[in-house]
Image: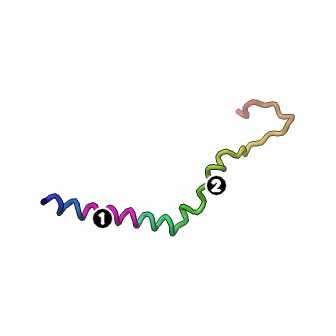
Amino acid sequence: MNILVILFPLALGLGLLGLAAFFWCMRTGQFSDLEGPSWRILRDDDLRSPGDTRVNDR
């Protein structure tokens, strides 16, 4: 039973820390655009002209 004196405040503190982190993320807009980065990685930014036959720029 003595371990509850340590575990209960520790669990409560970690829960409050997680809740504070969640509210901080909501306030700073971390969850505002969830689909943008997933589509941004698929977009081909280095489009080449049809006459360009180079394989690598290096």
Write down the residue under mark 2. Answer: 36
The C terminus lies in quadrant: top right
51 left or right, relative to 17: right
**Is residue 14 rendered magenta in the image?**
yes
As measured in the structure, the alpha-carbon distance from the residue carrying label 2 to the one carrying label 1 is: 34 Å
Give residue 33's position: percent from left, percent from top: 60, 59
Disc 1 is placed on an element classified as: helix
Residue 13's disc number: 1
Q: Which mark is residue 38?
A: none
Q: Which contiguous range is marked in magenta?
A: 9-19
Q: Position of residue 17 (x, y in %)?
A: 36, 64
- Vertically, is 29 above or below 48? below
- Along the line of sight, which residue is nearer the eye, 4 or 46? 4
Image quarter of residue 30: bottom right
x then y, percent, for residue 11: 28, 61
Q: Which residue is at 35% across, 66% downward?
A: 16
Q: Main secondary structure of the magenta part?
A: helix
**Mark sitting earlier along the chain (2/1):** 1
* Label 2 secondary element: helix
Q: Please, what is the three-letter code of the amino acid marked with disc 1?
A: Gly
The colour style of the image is: rainbow
Q: Which residue occupies the extreme right position in the image?
A: 51
The answer to whether mark 2 and mark 1 are in CB contact below 8 A is no
- Which quarter of the picture shows residue 19? bottom left
Amino acid type for the residue under numbered disc 2: Gly
Query: Does residue 3 lie above or below 55 as drawn?
Result: below
